Amino acid sequence: MFKRILIANRGEIAVRVIRACRRLGIEAVVVHSTADRETLAVRMADVAICIGPPAAKQSYLNINNIIAAGELADVDAIHPGYGFLSENSHFAQVVRDCNIQFIGPSSQSMDALGNKGKAKALAIDAGVPTVPGSPGVVKSPEDGIAIARKIGYPVMIKATAGGGGRGMRIAHNDASLVSGLIAAQREAEAAFGNADCIIEAYLQRARHIEIQIIGDQHGNVVALGERDCSTQRRHQKLVEESPSPVIDQITREKMCADAVKLAKTAKYFNAGTVEFIYDIDRKAYYFLEMNTRIQVEHCVTEMVTGIDLVQAQIKVAFGEKLEFTQADIKPQGHAIEVRINAEDWEHGFAPSPGKITMYVAPTGKGVRVDSHCYAGYTIPPHYDSMIAKLIVHGRDRAEAIRFLDQALDEYIIEGVKTTIPFHQRLIRDIRFVNSQVTTKFIDEEFFKAHS
């Protein structure tokens, strides 16, 4: 097994990977910016190396500095976490070229699946259902209009290299398609350095359902069930749960099989997530994209399967075969995760950085908290505003919601605004309780009802 792993990330995911390393008897090295000197990950790590000033481009996105830290600490492997460089195929290849193992897929698989246009073509080749749309990149506004008219409005304009809702627009007619395409291309170019966009049919009533997969370097790929991530704001996930309350077992098995097919077609190994959009009215699902990394919401899958995904990632990267087969995967109960962010939800989820003066996390049966924060910690303004992930597990969805409600009530964070009050209102909303949420619920219905 590896002797020493460098974690090229920060926050709760860095803490999460450190804990997995310790359970495997591996030393953990973390890199950090000057703004993160007091983070919990730095305190927990065996070795901590400062790699630059607060700006991400000069620290967590600085490939040269990260590689230098890895060589200085004499590490065997690098775990990228999620975000930052986790889906950067160039970084993955540079790591391997420096004789350090990258804990993730091959750079070739990342290239093939990280681009939405290429991934869609791969899905079609694998026989996985895809949303009706452009066969490739939209070449011009006139090309876009022709495609949209053929599909039928409304349509979704999506940046091929996008994510987190950036580079996405909805068009209801020719005029809004032209303006939306130009806006999406500009936003995508600024955010990702790639202005390419595709067009797909926009489903009116849909759920967002994703399949967690993991593969080894010996050709084995296993699906670990689904997560329902339909509760979103502006395409950003707010709540994730497993199993999905809206699909039946036959659909679940088909989605899992299609996710495995796609991964095998791409010769994929390590952890990944195949995302689908589920049309509630047609009871049909379509491939959206694949995330070639561990996800924020991986904890939900861990709670229902009992499998430590980060440990599995490390073992796969070392060259070991998966310790389980598809027949071994038998999810139990129901898990829900909410993201506790330092944000003022009543004022547009505005960031609320600052010093946490009091911090008491909930405990008890079926409750898990993944966090990097503590009383006295100052949340810097430079990065993602996540304080913690609160995950609960119950015998069924009703019990999981009760556990979550209690845990939110017990969670005490003072000194900064948080999204705890938002989540309390959300999970008590009868439409959430009755599984009537769509991907547009928060933006179009929830705020009107709770204003």
Image (tube, helix red, strand yellow):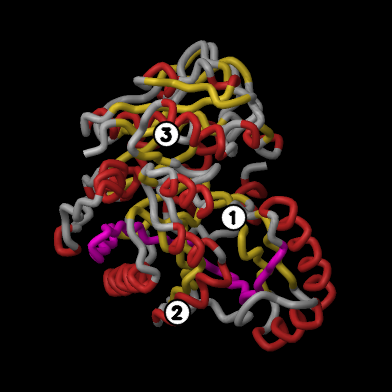
Q: Nearer the viewer, residue 46 or 401?
A: 46
- Please count the marks in the image: 3
User: Mark 3 highlights which residue?
Assistant: 7
Residue type at tag 1? Gly
Where residue 418 sits, quadrant-wise, is top right
Q: Look at the numbered discs 1 and 2 and tell me whether their residues touch, using CB distance below 8 Å.
A: no
User: Mark 1 highlights which residue?
Assistant: 163
Q: Is residue 396 above or below residue 390?
A: below
Q: Residues within 10 Å of mark 2 (few under 14, many from 20)?
A: some
Residue type at tag 2? Pro
User: Mark 2 highlights which residue?
Assistant: 129
Q: Earlier in the sequence, mark 2 or mark 3?
A: 3
Q: Look at the numbered discs 3 and 1 and tell me whether their residues touch, using CB distance below 8 Å.
A: no
Q: How many angstroms separate mark 1 from mark 2 (CA)?
A: 21 Å
Work out which quarter of the rendered image holds the N terminus and state it.
top left
- The residue shown at (18%, 57%) is 330
Position in image of residue 103 (x %, y %): 37, 46
Q: Look at the numbered discs 2 and 3 and tell me whether their residues touch, using CB distance below 8 Å.
A: no
Where residue 73 sits, quadrant-wise, is top left
| Secondary element type, mark 3 | strand
Q: How many angstroms separate mark 2 from mark 3 (CA)?
A: 36 Å
| Secondary element type, mark 1 | strand
Q: Residues within 10 Å of mark 1 (few under 14, many from 20)?
A: some
Q: Is residue 377 above or below residue 410?
A: above
- The residue shown at (37%, 22%) is 45
Work out which quarter of the rendered image holds the C terminus and state it.
top right
